[in-house]
Amino acid sequence: MIEVHHLNNSRSQRILWLLEELGVEYEIVKHQRDPETNLAPESLLAVHPLGKSPVIKDGDDVVIESGAIIEHLARKYGKGRLVPADGTPDALRYLQLMHYAEGSAMLPLMLKLYTGRLGEAGAPLHERIDSEIENHMGYLDSLLEGREWFVGDDLSAADVQLSFACQAAGMLYGVEKFPNLASFLERIKKRPAYQKSIERGGAYAFG
């Protein structure tokens, strides 16, 4: 059975959501952030040397990195679902967005989070960071114009991968300027699999 090392209020929530969408049985090992530092606990170091979440164990394999975990699970257990067929136009769009989520979209959001903790010391960076958030969220919003999902006509693993960046933007910046993203987040919340993942994973501030 798949074992998910789940850190509260983290990227690992989307792994639970994916597993619920796939209908795959899994166990959760819960880890709690330090209430003062908000850092992951040392218990994660026993699972992988980086001590980060998400981490899964699938048989003898330990898999890290959200994108790699999502690709592994969707391709192994999806039975053709959630991943577009190779060689199709959707396949290239899917590939780009899977990498874009963490490679580009998350950077200004993480900077927003960290500089916010610096108080006035971080103020000189705020305008540039906000500009980058608007650039990236505006791009994602444009991709959803006239459609419900980022790739194809149905939910794909790329939607799962992108969900955290969109949720983080909602919490750290707001999505009022991005109505298509706001609608995307509402569609996510209404999915039974997503609701079940929150029920099993626990309270989720980014949702």
Image (spheres, rainbow, N blue to C red):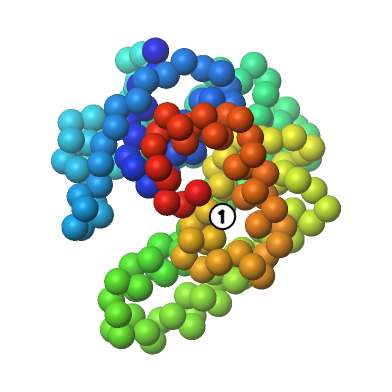
Question: Which quadrant would residue 199 be assigned to in this image?
Answer: top left
Question: Which quadrant would residue 131 be assigned to in this image?
Answer: bottom right
Q: Nearer the viewer, residue 202 or 86?
A: 202
Q: Position of residue 52 (x, y in %)?
A: 29, 42
Q: Nearer the viewer, residue 198 or 57?
A: 198
Direction right: furthest residue:
146
Q: In the picture, which quadrant includes the N terminus?
A: top left
Indicate left or right for 162 with 2 as reference: right
Is residue 67 visible in this depiction of the protein? yes
Indicate left or right for 127 with 188 as reference: left
- Amino acid carrying label 1: it is Cys
Would you place residue 105 above or below residue 2 in this image? below
Is residue 12 visible in this depiction of the protein? no
Q: Secondary structure at mark 1?
A: helix
Would you place residue 62 above or below residue 104 in this image? above
Question: Which quadrant would residue 6 be assigned to in this image?
Answer: top left
Q: Position of residue 110 (x, y in %)?
A: 41, 62
Indicate left or right for 113 with 37 as reference: right
Q: Position of residue 198 (x, y in %)?
A: 47, 36
Q: Residue at image x 62%, y 50%?
A: 185
Q: Residue at image x 57%, y 40%?
A: 160
- The crowd level at tag 1 (other Cα within 10 Å; few <14, some 14-19, many 20+) is many
Would you place residue 21 above or below residue 6 in this image? above
Q: Position of residue 106 (x, y in %)?
A: 48, 58
- The residue tagged 1 is 166
Q: How many numbered callouts?
A: 1
Q: Residue at image x 47%, y 75%?
A: 129
